[in-house]
Image (cartoon, helix red, strand yellow):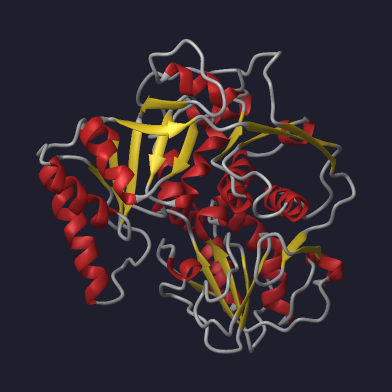
């Protein structure tokens, strides 16, 4: 069995599972946020069981429209907050919170070998920790909160092997954009993407979170990494409960094996209006921007902010550009503050936000007007994703976003002298 199949089998009453089978899977953690939780709560209340199956296995995080931007978002957050207090489930209020997919690994709530489901498509982020994590609809989440399990089809696994060594300014964001550009937005449809190879072995945890996060942009059910020493060093100080590490069998069957030599790839940019519309930064052309966003569940971790600060230090954001920097959690914010990064950003002319998804989904803190262009470290650049349907979003790593904020156009870090 593959890594995903091993974990799924361990969470059923079956000795083994294979792609295409329908199974009832016990879940270790259930997640919802201020957009998706209210729907799940209302559906849960219709079931009539009264209490969630296990309060310690249900987590709710307000992160999309917080601090609340209007009355409607305040009502959404209030409904979730009151349900969380009533049920005694894990709830992270603003001030102790952050973007859910940055927060949960940081808090040690997701561990290797877990099955995690979340009412958010980027729940697949936790595959960086060797967990089987996937997004589902709010009604599925409601049923799981009542029963503790979920009905699902076992997905096939695509093995992606990355050879070579990464060039300067090339990281996890570039690897996943390059991959999606190669296989397309449906290239891994309802499949697990298993990331391997010597390049992956040397990739930081923050880089792995970025890659797992965007697996869904290739249509994947999950994106997964094997647990190695780097994973263990991240997990051990955070883990609050025992966990089990699973390994794929040597004779595991993969639906497809794709190999890349990434030694010569440049930093990548995804042009509107698809994460698969990728080009090397040198081939993007002269594209002026109005806004740069650095943050999100894709690139809002401390490594991402350090990379941006390295570019912005002793430089100024272009006078016609709005540069918005959003730490992924309160801890990331604090680390950036004590590390001097916030001062660098402010002196450069950037604005630093409290942790929030905000502009990524066109929610607040950076919504685009007609005709505006934004370079962003977020995960999607669909039509209208960040505001007006007549705006444009370009996806990149934090170094390109920071360099572009200085240049006033999409630029490589190598251009910033």
Residue 249 spot, x, y in % from top left: 65, 14
Q: Is residue 148 left or right of residue 81?
A: right
- Classify the position of the C terminus by image quarter: bottom right
| Snapshot quadrant of residue 195 | top right
Rendered position, 189 above or below 151: below
Rendered position, 291 above or below 253: below
Q: Is residue 240 left or right of residue 353?
A: left
Which residue is found at the position 70% from the left and 38% from the top?
A: 203
Residue 312 visible at all: no
Which residue is found at the position 31% from the left and 75% from the top?
A: 69
- Classify the position of the N terminus by image quarter: top right
| Snapshot quadrant of residue 165 | top right
Residue 14 spot, x, y in % from top left: 43, 13
- Which is nearer the eye, 345 or 93? 93
- Which is nearer the eye, 173 or 151? 151
Which residue is found at the position 32% from the left and 61% from the top?
A: 35
Q: Is residue 139 left or right of residue 231?
A: left
């Amino acid at each position: 069995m593959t890594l995903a199949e091993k974990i799924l089998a361990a969470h059923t009453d079956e000795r083994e599972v294979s792609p295409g089978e329908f199974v009832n899977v016990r879940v270790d953690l259930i997640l919802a946020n201020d957009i998706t939780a209210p729907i799940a709560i209302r559906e849960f209340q219709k079931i009539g069981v009264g209490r969630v199956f296990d309060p310690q296995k249900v987590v709710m995080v307000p992160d999309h429209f917080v601090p609340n931007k209007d009355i409607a978002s305040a009502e959404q957050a209030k409904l979730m907050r009151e349900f969380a207090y009533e049920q005694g489930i894990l709830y992270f209020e603003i001030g102790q919170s952050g973007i859910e997919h940055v927060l949960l690994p940081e808090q040690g709530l997701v561990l290797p070998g877990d099955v995690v489901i979340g009412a958010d498509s980027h729940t697949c982020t936790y595959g960086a920790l060797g967990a089987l994590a996937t997004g589902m609809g709010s009604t599925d989440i409601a049923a799981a909160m009542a029963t503790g399990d979920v009905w699902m089809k076992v997905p096939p696994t695509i093995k992606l092997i990355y050879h070579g060594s990464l060039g300067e300014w090339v990281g996890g964001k570039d690897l996943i954009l390059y991959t999606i550009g190669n296989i397309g937005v449906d290239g891994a449809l309802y499949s697990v993407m298993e990331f391997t190879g010597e390049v992956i072995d040397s990739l930081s945890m923050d880089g792995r979170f970025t890659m797992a996060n965007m697996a869904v942009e290739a249509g994947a059910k999950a994106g997964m990494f094997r647990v190695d020493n780097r994973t263990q060093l991240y997990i051990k100080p955070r883990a609050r409960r025992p966990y089990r590490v699973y390994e794929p069998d040597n004779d595991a069957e993969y639906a497809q094996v794709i190999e890349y030599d990434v030694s010569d790839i440049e930093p990548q940019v995804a042009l509107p209006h698809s994460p698969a519309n990728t080009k090397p930064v040198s081939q993007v052309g002269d594209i002026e921007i109005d806004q740069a966003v650095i943050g999100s569940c894709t690139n809002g971790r401390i490594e991402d902010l350090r990379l941006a600060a390295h570019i912005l230090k002793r430089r100024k954001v272009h006078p016609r550009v709005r540069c918005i920097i959003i730490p992924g959690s309160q801890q990331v914010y604090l680390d950036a503050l004590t590390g001097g990064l916030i001062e660098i950003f402010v002196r450069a002319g950037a604005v630093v936000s409290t942790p929030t998804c905000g502009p990524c989904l066109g929610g607040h803190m950076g919504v685009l007007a007609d005709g505006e262009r934004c370079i962003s470290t977020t995960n999607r650049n669909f039509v209208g994703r960040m505001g007006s349907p007549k705006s444009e979003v370009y996806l990149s790593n934090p170094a390109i976003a920071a360099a572009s904020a200085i240049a006033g156009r999409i630029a490589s870090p190598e251009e910033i002298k």
